[in-house]
Amino acid sequence: MSRIEKLQELLKKSGEDSFLQHALALEYIKIGNDTEARLLFTKILQREPAYVGSYYHLAKLLERAGEIDKAIEVYKKGMMEAKAVNDNHSYNELMMALEDVEE
């Protein structure tokens, strides 16, 4: 059974678990399925905006798709959420990524 299949099985049992969905989205990225990854990250952030780790990955997917304005929006939203939960590491990571894309 692949990692994707294992994560899908766990999600069937546990419902909408942000950690499992995030892990599944990362697996989709590994196999080049950006569409599914993007859907999962979006779903996570709609349901749980403070799940800060997903902002970076969603914004990177948007960048890769050429949707720079949307990526910038996501980075900024992620920075606000990271600041709200005092996650300085994530805030700095998002800020550096934002600076890179704005250059």
Image (cartoon, rainbow, N blue to C red):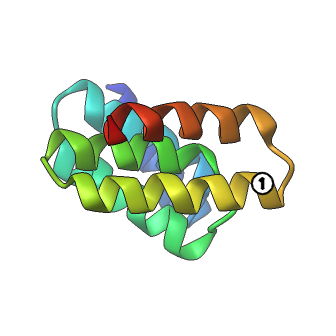
Q: Nearer the viewer, residue 69 or 86?
A: 69
Residue 30 figure quarter: top left
Identify which residue is drawn at 72% across, 52% down.
82
Seen from the viewer's position, the closer of residues 95 and 11 is: 95
Residue 34 in view in this figure: yes
Q: Is residue 2 above or below residue 64?
A: above
Dividing the picture into quadrants, the one containing residue 69 is bottom left
Q: Is residue 42 above or below residue 37?
A: below
Residue 47 image point, x, y percent = 57, 74
**Residue 95 percent location from the top left of the image:** 57, 39
Quick check: 86 left or right of 53? right
Q: Quadrant of residue 13?
A: bottom right
- Of the residues shown, which amino acid type is indicated by label 1? Lys
Q: Residue at x 53, y 57 (%)?
A: 76
- For the point 83% across and 56% down, the residue is 85
Q: Which residue is mark 1?
A: 83
Q: Secondary structure at mark 1?
A: helix
